[in-house]
Amino acid sequence: MQFLLNEEQILIQNTARRLAGDRIAPLAERLDRGEGREEFLANLKFLAENGFMALNVAADYGGAEAGAVAFALAIEEVGRACASTGVTMSVTNMVAEVIQAVGSEEQRAAYLPKIAGGIYPAAAFCLTESGAGSDPSSMRTKAVRDGNHYVLNGSKLYITSAEYAGIFVVWAVTDPDAPRGKGISCFLVERDTPGLVIGKAEKKMGQTGSVTNEVHFEDCRIPATQMMGEENDGFRIAVGELAGGRIGIAALALGISRAAMDAAKSYVKERKQFGKAIADMQGIQWMIADRETELEAARLLILQAAHLKDAGKPFAREASMAKLFSSEAAQRATYTALQLHGGAGYIREYPLERYARDARITTIYEGTSEIQRLIIAREVLKEI
Ligand SMILES: Cc1cc2nc3c(=O)[nH]c(=O)nc-3n(C[C@H](O)[C@H](O)[C@H](O)COP(=O)(O)OP(=O)(O)OC[C@H]3O[C@@H](n4cnc5c(N)ncnc54)[C@H](O)[C@@H]3O)c2cc1C
């Protein structure tokens, strides 16, 4: 296995680190307080203009064509600066990859340049419903054929970036009589389509700069040409594309962990108690050693999954392992970093409590830790 980064990957990592440090990190605290929406949208456009919204999309469609490893490295850097921006970038890249993977030539040409170029501030992935979270095959949103159109009815829940997304990839039931997961299709719905209604924005524990909305379809009529892939093959598409997204969330979790642990390492060297820096106490050193070892393991799992994806090999098991491990490690890293700050960690003047809140969702969205374990177990048991 070859984990040395190539020149292009190093360039993207360095560029992401610089842009994130200059433009994205300074806004993170205000975004967390519910301010700075205009600057946030400007940053999304800026990220697109620098190639970060379609990192793994072909240059023919305006993408950076940089691959999954570069994507993971960039998400880690942006997530380290601001988790809300990182998740927006991750989901937008995932939508772009779905369109590239299963869209027709016309669909790719129509939508990918708009995502890649920042004409759309973001893109949305509409799978979850109130009764269909871990089990999306039980979704109720319907798409009924009517001549050259489909008419969509139903509601999606917890949709990242819905408020400002330009394009929505939407899953809906096209054959209600088919066995579980066999009657679902995938559609592209443009933002201004009549009947696409953006519902309430959720009030969240963390990643508050990224908006999460209900999305309703009320007799939403779209041309039949907006279907992606084959009719009734949508569930397979969703499962396949979520694996790529999990590399992004794993990298995001690693980025948040790094921000927290970097702050903690500086703090313990400065903070003195009992006449010496607390970094000189072995108990503190062990906490740091354990967390840093976990972050290194998370990094290797992420790189492995991304590397397999770039090589065109199966990577679902590795992506689930990376997401499971990195997101769970992020809970420990952000809480350890907060603990190492003592009372200051709990005070809003420091970013530690924000890191802990931002990290919390990473074990839940794009498949909970329990669902990652189901996928991993299924894959490893299949091998016997
Ligand atoms: C901030 C945020 C952003 C999101 N963004 C998006 C988005 O952009 N697009 C989108 O489509 N969705 C999005 N989601 C939805 C997210 O992916 C789901 O919330 C998640 O998959 C879990 O589904 P659920 O909330 O219905 O929980 P449930 O499925 O009801 O799970 C409840 C609990 O039961 C456990 N559980 C369920 N089934 C099993 C099982 N078989 N074995 C063991 N344990 C099990 C779960 O792990 C969990 O602990 C987002 C959610 C949030 C909170």
Image: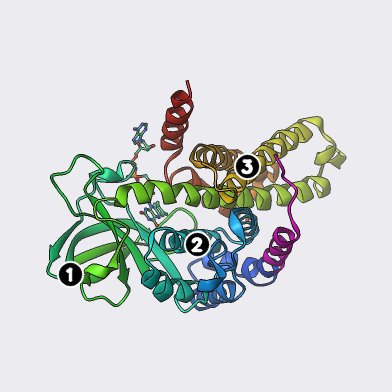
| Residue 149 inside the magenta-drawn segment | no
Type of residue at label 1? His
What residue does disc 3 label? Answer: 304
- Magenta segment, which residues? 1-18
In the rendered view, would you say 21 is above or below 158? below
Type of residue at label 3? Gln
On the rendered structure, is 296 left or right of 53?
A: right
Q: Residue at x 41, y 31 (%)?
A: 374
Q: CA distance from mark 3 to mark 1?
A: 42 Å
Find residue 214 and report its horizontal and vertical position in percent: 30, 61
Task: Report the magenta stretch's main SS.
Answer: helix
Q: CA distance from mark 2 to mark 3?
A: 19 Å
What residue does disc 1 label? Answer: 149
Answer yes or no: is residue 224 visible: yes
Q: How is the image coloured?
A: rainbow
The kind of secondary structure element at disc 1 is strand
